[in-house]
Image (cartoon, grey):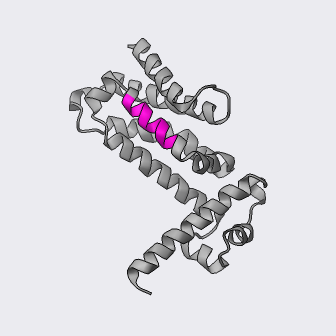
């Protein structure tokens, strides 16, 4: 098998494994899902699963890393001075990403091992924002700027999580507009 074919096969296997996990979560409690369940649903052998993941926890951790990397890419694309004045375009991008990956994110929220990841997301995002070299170093290092980063990241993260739990009504686009309004009101 050529390197290119092997790469495509690896990507295909990972997608099948993730899809199987998502499907299984529709009918089974997360802590009751086994590797056997996943490989049977994906129509793969156990060796294929273990070639990519040590266990289910490693699969969930891989999904967490993918989400973090995607959020970092969204933040990296932002022009920070403009973002601080008008966060709506960024929230719309985040909302689109969340909608596009709703099933994947639902997987994270269903696993107890994901709870620390979910609660750490605001810290990761705030840390990423306050490390941006697009913002003057004196501003970036100020206590007020860091507090704003944590406040906005924590508030946005909590609101998005509440939306996923069904505690906030409306679309993710509505949520992006609400978050922008909250931030503008706080200025």
Q: Nearer the viewer, residue 89 or 119?
A: 89
Q: Give the residue at x 21% y 30%.
A: 136
Image position of 158 with respect to 115: above or below: above
Where is residue 84? Give x, y as percent: 32, 25
Residue that extends furthest to the bottom in the rendered view of this protein = 1
Q: Give the residue at x 30% y 26%.
A: 142
Q: Does the magenta stretch include residue 88?
A: no
For this view, does 139 lie left or right of residue 96? left
Q: Which of 170 and 31 is in front in this view?
A: 170
For this view, does 108 lie left or right of residue 10? right
SS assignment for the magenta stretch, majority:
helix
Q: Nearer the viewer, residue 155 or 162?
A: 162
Where is residue 89? Give x, y as percent: 37, 30
Where is residue 74? Give x, y as percent: 38, 42
Q: Give the residue at x 39% y 39%.
A: 127
Q: Quadrant of residue 166?
A: top right
The total number of labels drawn is 0
Where is residue 105? Give x, y as percent: 58, 47
Image position of 60 with respect to 121: above or below: below
Q: Give the residue at x 68% y 71%.
A: 39
Image position of 70 with respect to 84: above or below: below
Quadrant housing the N terminus = bottom left
Q: Quadrant of residue 134?
A: top left
Q: Can residue 141 be seen in this view?
A: no
Magenta segment boundaries in residue numbering:
89-98
Quadrant housing the C terminus = top left
Q: Can residue 7 be seen in this view?
A: yes
Q: Does the magenta stretch include residue 90?
A: yes
């Amino acid at each position: 098998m050529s390197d290119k074919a092997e790469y495509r096969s690896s990507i295909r296997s990972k997608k099948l494994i993730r899809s199987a996990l998502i499907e299984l979560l529709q009918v089974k409690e997360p802590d009751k899902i086994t590797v056997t369940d996943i490989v049977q649903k994906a129509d793969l052998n156990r060796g294929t699963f273990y070639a990519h993941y040590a266990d289910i926890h490693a699969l969930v951790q891989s999904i967490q890393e993918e989400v973090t990397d995607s959020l970092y890419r969204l933040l990296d694309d932002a022009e920070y001075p403009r973002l601080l004045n008008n966060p709506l375009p960024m929230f719309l991008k985040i909302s689109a990403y969340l909608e596009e990956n709703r099933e994947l994110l639902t997987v994270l929220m269903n696993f107890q091992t994901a709870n620390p990841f979910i609660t750490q997301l605001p810290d990761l995002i705030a840390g990423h924002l306050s490390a941006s070299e697009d913002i003057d170093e004196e501003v970036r290092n100020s206590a007020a700027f860091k507090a704003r980063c944590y406040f906005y990241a924590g508030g946005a993260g909590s609101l998005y999580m509440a939306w996923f739990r069904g505690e906030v009504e409306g679309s993710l686009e509505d949520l992006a507009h609400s978050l922008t309004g909250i931030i503008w009101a706080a200025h």
